[in-house]
Image (spheres, rainbow, N blue to C red):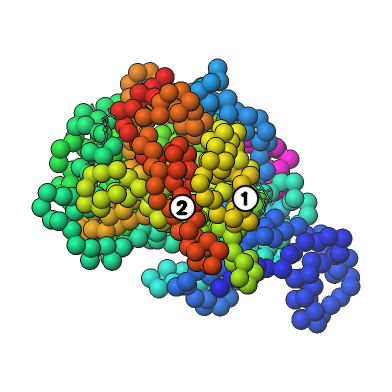
Amino acid sequence: MEVRGPRVEGRGSCLPPLLSFLFLLSSLGAPSSCLSAPLLWAPEPDQLFRVPEGWRSEGRVAPSHPLGLTFALRQRNRDRLEALVAELSSPRSTHYGRFLSLAEVGALVAPSLETLDVVGAWLEEHGVSECQVVATMDFLQCQMPAGTAERLLPGARFHRFVNEEQRSVALSPTPYSLSKEMQEHVDFVGGLHRFPPEKRALVRSWAAKEPGPRSTFHLGVTPAVLRKRYNLTEADVGGSPNSSQACAQFLEQYFHPADLSEFMHLFGGGFPHLSSVDQVVGHQGGGKAGLEASLDVEYLMSAGANISTWVFSNAGRHEGQEPFLAWLLELSNRSSLPWVHSVSYGDDEDSLSAAYMQRVNVEFQKAAVRGVTILFASGDSGAGCRTVQRGKHVFRPSFPASSPYVTTVGGTSFQHPFLVSVEVSDYISGGGFSNVFPMPEYQTSAVKWFLSTAPKLPPSSYFNASGRAYPDLAALSDNYWVVSNRIPLPWVSGTSASTPVVAGILALINDRRLQRGLPPLGFLNPALYRLQDQGHGAALFDVTSGCHLSCLDAIVEGQGFCAAPSWDPVTGWGTPNFPELLRALMD
Ligand SMILES: *[C@@H]1O[C@H](CO)[C@@H](O)[C@H](O)[C@H]1NC(C)=O
Ligand SMILES: *[C@@H]1O[C@H](CO)[C@@H](O)[C@H](O)[C@H]1NC(C)=O
Ligand SMILES: *[C@@H]1O[C@H](CO)[C@@H](O)[C@H](O)[C@H]1NC(C)=O
Ligand SMILES: *[C@@H]1O[C@H](CO)[C@@H](O)[C@H](O)[C@H]1NC(C)=O
Ligand SMILES: *[C@@H]1O[C@H](CO)[C@@H](O)[C@H](O)[C@H]1NC(C)=O
């Protein structure tokens, strides 16, 4: 189900179209109330309200129903922040690696006193008093009953939605607005329209039917297989007490410590490793373990072996809360964070409002200037597909994979499924070009090279060749073994498997850098895209064959882009060759 709400914008008229419509329905129209009504402004008129499969509406919530909403306040010095990312992340810059503390980031971007005053007074006027602020002062998290929220945000109507696991969330299918004077103080209000992310790990059970020679070959990807392919020896484990890594999981995705220790017992032979996480931030429910959650932790801690690991688990305490936003708030509220983060969350770019994506992007910039490396899975739908009108399709980029300020990880398979062999593109590997973010400078020459040399490109009407192109690199994403609810399961696949593997490998490189007194890698892309020019072509195994999927129509016939020498929009630069990548990233 997709409903794009009517635009709610108080352009000159005293009531926006939606409100005047409701107004007419109630047939109590009094011109005097019209005169005193404030002009309204809609921060996210382009946000799609889409009820995901498996969720159903249970009607309006009671006015007393408790909600948690997030107010993204307008930051100062955004241009300066953007310039700083380039200065601190580019190995060519004299300020490379001179990262900022959280307090310094706060001093740079915290909203003006006027913004804090105006928003504070507006909330107070509506009886909203239960709010927490983050250390950088640019997010407010407030609790209030639905009735208050509906008065505060004209147009919003909160309904309860329930999914098959009886998880419920209160969201507004209709767009909200704010009084026009908030336009210069608020970016958007979170917790109204976006559903919690769904599970993403794939189980390709069909693969189990493939006949395979059973004795001398591997029967699926395990830590030993990964470490062999990526050239990690027994000695390639963490050794600095200061290195750290994390994964983030959303909704009812819990990992069980017992699954992790069982996994390490079964598959952790041959390399020193830890078998428990150091810190869980957020809520760890006691329910069934999620496959995705088990996968993240088990492979992050196998690649980044013997490295202190955190899990961010953000099942929101309040209905209506967006768990992904809750994670972003945590990043801005902790002065000490793990250096590397692996996240397997993504949404269709076209379903999200521009205000939301731009602001999330600024949050990634804030992490980048602190030296934090953030990796996102590129998605499991290849180039994706969107119908623009009957019979006409375009590819469908995914966000945050398409953000220019994160490192995006695609997927590969072994050419011979049962041998540690050369890798080819995994046809599910997400990749393509953003329609929102222009191509960042660090990747222009690599992407232009691809576009001008690829033997066969999809028609140009299917993608936006001027956008940020992804993924940036890749790793195996096919046939993983995972222990979940004490049961070893084969055939788990997807870029949510490749992402923690790359995260663990980068955490190991950080570990070596910290031991040598160097700063951590921080935002990797500016360094990554110049490795080849620096003569470090062997740092990544170039994946040059195979294509990913896209629209099933007569023009592209299900095929998106194809891998090619050097960078390509299926596997990026390729997969990590640890010893060479380490060497390349040690200066
Ligand atoms: C940020 O952390 C402080 C304590 O360090 C806490 O009081 C505050 O509620 C947190 N803010 C949010 C939005 O959670
Ligand atoms: C790494 O692995 C590849 C193939 O698996 C091999 O060809 C190469 O020699 C190995 N060692 C280094 C240091 O690259
Ligand atoms: C594991 O890391 C710790 C530091 O966190 C280090 O003291 C220890 O020697 C490492 N173990 C191995 C086997 O390298
Ligand atoms: C293509 O991407 C640019 C940003 O790089 C954007 O401004 C433009 O609107 C996009 N075009 C389409 C058709 O989406
Ligand atoms: C770890 O960090 C502490 C405090 O920042 C520093 O004093 C110490 O030298 C670091 N140790 C290593 C091995 O990097």
Is residue 160 left or right of 544 when viewed as pictured?
A: right
Q: State the image quarter where residue 105 is shown.
A: top right
Residue 51 position within the rendered picture, expressed as x and y whole percent measured from the top left: 53, 70
Residue 12 visible? The answer is yes
Q: Residue at the location (43% across, 23% down)? A: 535
Q: Main secondary structure of the magenta part?
A: helix
Q: Which residue is mark 2?
A: 430
**402 or 186: nearer the viewer:** 402
Question: For this view, does 435 lie left or right of residue 341?
Answer: right
Find the magenta span and give its range.
108-121
Q: Residues within 10 Å of mark 1 (few under 14, many from 20)?
A: some
Give the residue at x 67% y 60%. Answer: 46
Q: Is residue 487 above or below residue 187?
A: below
* Residue 74: percent from left, percent from top: 67, 43
Q: Is residue 481 above or below residue 288?
A: above
Q: Three-letter amino acid code at disc 1? A: Asn
Above or below residue 16? Residue 122 is above
In this figure, which residue is indicated by the disc labeled 1? Answer: 464
Which residue occupies the foreground of this view, 397 or 59? 397
Look at the numbered disc 1 and give the secondary structure of its residue: loop
Instruction: Work out whether residue 101 can be spotted.
Output: no
Of labels 2 and 1, earlier in sequence is 2
Residue in the picture at 21% in, 28% down: 235
Residue 516 sits in quarter: top left
Which element is circle 2 on? loop
Q: Amino acid type of disc 2?
A: Gly
Q: Quadrant of ligand 3?
A: top left
Q: Residue 407: which disc?
A: none
